[in-house]
Amino acid sequence: MLKVGSLFSGAGLCDLGLHWAGFEHRWFCEVDQFCRSVLARHWPGIPIYEDVRTLKGDELPPVDVFCGGFPCQDVSQGGKHAGIKEGTRSGLWLEYARLIGEMRPRYVIIENVRGLLARGIEIVLQDLAEIGYDAEWEVLSAAALGAPHRRERVFVVAFPHGNYPDPEYRLLSPLQRIVGEVEQPFGVLDWPGIRIVGQSREAVRHAYPGPSFIEWMMGVPEGWTIP
């Protein structure tokens, strides 16, 4: 059973997925008091640290997996666009990278908004490379897990350099294998849907009978109704 250390844990939504997959949490780190109370309720007895900046790798219980989504405010499309640097909230990635180097887990799972691809993914990948980690990444939509909205997120999975010499092997593909064959309260779709702008509903259904999104650019077209 893989042991998990969770950074920027929030209310534990990413951690819930790992729990469903059979992982065991050793500790959390979350600054928000309300979120810490949620974590304590659902993972009683597991240590919850408050400030990532004060953590030291040699003082933490060893783990196999790091997971966490560092703050997105400075890389989000709707945020400040300050990027990843000292003094910004998204700059707390630097603390994440420091702890990876100090503890050297077998796997690292990083989550953030799609805007990271334009405002800092190169910093994340460079930092990982400098401490000896290879990485792969993918943009996944909430719709791929059955939610009625896109909410795209970047997921990066990193591992020590050379652990996967076969270039054809990917951890992040296909989606069905990522989630795993365990009991879940939702259906998993291998294909995340299609995005169609300004086409008729009949044309969408004719082109693809599965899940789809229709984006309204100028309101609802005349004669259309929303179910």
Image (cartoon, grey):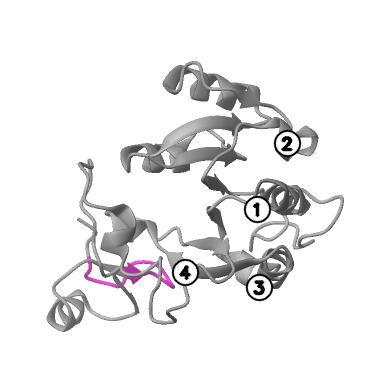
Amino acid tagged 3: Ala
Residue at x-position 59% and y-position 69%:
161
Q: Which residue is mark 3?
A: 118
Amino acid tagged 1: Cys
Q: Which residue is mark 1?
A: 72
Q: Of helix, strand and loop, which one carries label 2?
A: helix
Q: Residue 145 location in percent, x, y?
A: 30, 55
Sequence-wise, which precedes: disc 3 or disc 4?
Answer: 3
Which callout, 4 or 2, points to the residue nearer the camera?
Answer: 2
Alpha-carbon distance for marks 4 and 1?
17 Å
Which callout, 3 or 4, points to the residue nearer the camera?
Answer: 4
- Classify the position of the C terminus by image quarter: bottom left
Q: Which mark is residue 138?
A: 4
Which callout, 2 or 3, points to the residue nearer the camera?
Answer: 2
Which callout, 2 or 1, points to the residue nearer the camera?
Answer: 2
- Residue range (magenta): 214-224
- Left or right of 150, for residue 87: right
Residue at x-position 56% and y-position 35%:
10
Sequence-wise, which precedes: disc 2 or disc 1?
Answer: 2
